[in-house]
């Protein structure tokens, strides 16, 4: 694969986004829409709490005017080139991605994947939201 200055610039923008929070993975669904929304974040920052979640825990994406509630279905560890985790879904789903293992120093060799299904989804014709999500809470079923 050849690297051009344009692709280096894109990677730099993504790095800047992830240093400030999380970022939507291009090519995945829009927020609250039919399909699989992919969001990436650093394991030693915003997504540190992902190491403590389990299936059936709740994730809330807080947007201006509404909150989308997702329920975690699966957690898995995959290789970085495994894009099957972003498969299309006929309903709104959320896939959170961070590096793994959590306590590894340096460039981690795997990805930690949390897949969740929206709980309060109306249907495929919802109005697109153009704002960046803020993940306010990731709660365990014990909380």
Image (cartoon, rainbow, N blue to C red):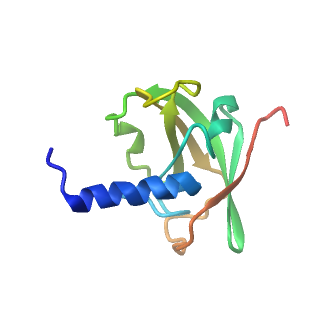
Extreme residue toward the left, this view: 2
In the displayed structure, would residue 138 be above or below residue 123? above
What's the residue at 47%, 60% (across, down)? 34
Q: Nearer the viewer, residue 104 or 113?
A: 104
What's the residue at 54%, 43% (across, down)? 42
- Residue 140: x, y in percent? 77, 36
Q: Is residue 7 left or right of residue 109?
A: left
Quadrant where the N terminus lies?
Answer: top left
Q: Nearer the viewer, residue 47 or 93?
A: 47
Q: Nearer the viewer, residue 57 or 101?
A: 101
Residue 86 can be seen, yes or no: yes
Q: Is residue 142 left or right of residue 97?
A: right
Q: Is residue 16 left or right of residue 69?
A: left
What's the residue at 69%, 30% (across, down)? 52
Extreme residue toward the right, this view: 143
Q: Is residue 136 left or right of residue 17?
A: right
- Residue 119: x, y in percent? 66, 52
- Residue 31: x, y in percent? 53, 63
Q: How many marks?
A: 0
Q: Quadrant of residue 43?
A: top right
- Residue 115: x, y in percent? 54, 40
In the displayed structure, would residue 139 be above or below residue 100? below
In the displayed structure, would residue 128 be above or below residue 134? below
Quadrant where the C terminus lies?
Answer: top right
Q: Nearer the viewer, residue 5 or 138?
A: 5
Residue 92 can be seen, yes or no: no
């Amino acid at each position: 694969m050849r690297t051009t200055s344009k692709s280096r610039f894109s990677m730099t923008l993504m790095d800047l986004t992830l240093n400030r929070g999380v970022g939507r993975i291009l090519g995945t669904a829009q927020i609250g829409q039919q399909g699989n929304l992919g969001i990436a974040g650093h394991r030693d920052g915003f997504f540190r709490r992902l190491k403590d979640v389990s299936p059936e825990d709740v994730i809330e994406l807080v947007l201006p005017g509404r909150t989308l509630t997702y329920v975690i279905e699966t957690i898995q560890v995959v290789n970085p080139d495994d894009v099957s985790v972003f498969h299309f879904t006929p309903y709104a789903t959320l896939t959170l991605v961070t590096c793994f293992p959590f306590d590894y120093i340096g460039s981690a060799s795997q990805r930690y994947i949390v897949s969740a299904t929206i709980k309060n989804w109306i249907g495929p014709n919802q109005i697109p939201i153009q704002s960046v999500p803020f993940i306010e809470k990731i709660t365990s079923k014990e909380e």
